Image (cartoon, helix red, strand yellow):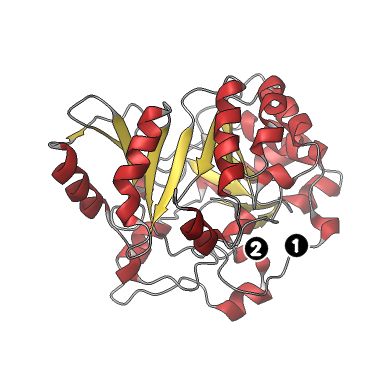
Amino acid sequence: MGLLLDRYQRPLRSLRLSVTDRCNFRCTYCMPEEEYRWLPRKDILSLEEMARVARVFARVGVRRVRFTGGEPLLRRELPELVSMVAAIPEIQDVALTTNGMLLAGLAKELRAAGLQRLNISLDTLNPQRFQTLTRRHALPQVLAGIEAAWDAGFRGTKIDTVLMRGQNEDEILDLLEFSFQRQLKLRFIEYMDVGGATRWSESQVFSRDAILELVETHYGGVEALEPLDPSAPARIYRLPHGLEFGIIASTTAPFCGECDRSRVAADGSWYSCLYAHHGTNLRALLRDGRDDDSLVDAITSIWQARADRGAEDRKAMVERGPVMDLDDLLADPRLEMHTRGG
């Protein structure tokens, strides 16, 4: 089939596949509440169903699959799923985003299964602050996971750091040096008002401009590089000594115009935008005997009608607060960031 495009001529190239809604951290910017509703166990897709989802999306143009959560390493037999997806001929890139806590024990197996790239979340190098931000004493395990990834043969691993004003922006330089010394690709991420970010406020956003000002003050001039892939969320910058880092400025400089990503939650709910309030129930199509051609037709018609520009719509708001309130999230766990994946 020809290139599948939405109403703004954006292709469908990247699939983020959430394998679980459960997480072993309680990060303050993602899961700040004490009470959560979980997806019903009977609705969670099997490994075979998830592999079928990936195969069908590959038929309509997806070339990159990223496993997310929740925390994807909590999903039992995840390497088996990685192997199934890596074997799909059309899929060129298989990646995973993790908090790293369980990575040390799984890195080699994941690499052997065909996983090509890793993103590891790390918002601080300070043990006490780590506990405050994640509500877990797990920094040593995460650091061990980063080392294990290198030992397993992963190169170019990305470190994802969510910056929040007044909480961890004072570690920007330390995190840069930490990443440079270990040949990691650091990505600073603006605090986003998505899903479960019920405590979000605009005053807490440490913006791309603020990051660049701080970095330039310490290192000197920062060069913005031309993107190799315009659809990539991070913009890359080079320091005078040649080392590079990225910034994902989804809050202050949305990139909806180049977005080629969609997300499937662990229960088969498909979202064409991270900010979408409603998704498409692919699980029903998977379990009612439909063949792959029927799934392809459904995905094609929905993507062709896609007109989402969620981050741009949020930026245009005069008064901006959390995108969801707690009552909405308790009523529908599919609205949570940890359910649909980042």
Whether residue 78 sits left or right of residue 318 in the image: it is right
Please report the residue visible at 43 percent of the width from the left and 28 percent of the height from the top.
182
Whether residue 243 sits left or right of residue 10 in the image: it is left
Please report the residue visible at 27 percent of the width from the left and 56 percent of the height from the top.
207
Q: Amino acid at mark 1?
A: Leu
User: Percent position (x, y) of residue 108?
Assistant: 68, 24
Q: Amino acid at mark 2?
A: Arg
Say if residue 274 shows up in the picture. no
Please report the residue visible at 30 percent of the width from the left and 30 percent of the height from the top.
244
CB under 8 Å between callouts 2 and 1? yes
**Depth check: 119 or 129 in front?**
129
Mark 2 and mark 1: Cα distance apart in space: 8 Å
Total of numbered circles in the picture? 2
Give the numbered dot on residue 334.
2
Say if residue 199 shows up in the picture. yes
- 10 Å crowding of disc 2: few (<14), some (14-19), many (20+): many
**Depth check: 323 or 109 in front?**
109
Please report the residue visible at 36 percent of the width from the left and 53 percent of the height from the top.
250
Dot 1 corresponds to which residue? Answer: 39
Mark 1 lies on a secondary structure that is loop
User: Percent position (x, y) of residue 10?
Assistant: 42, 40
Whether residue 139 sits left or right of residue 289 in the image: it is left
Mark 2 lies on a secondary structure that is helix
Residue 48 image-quadrant placement? top right
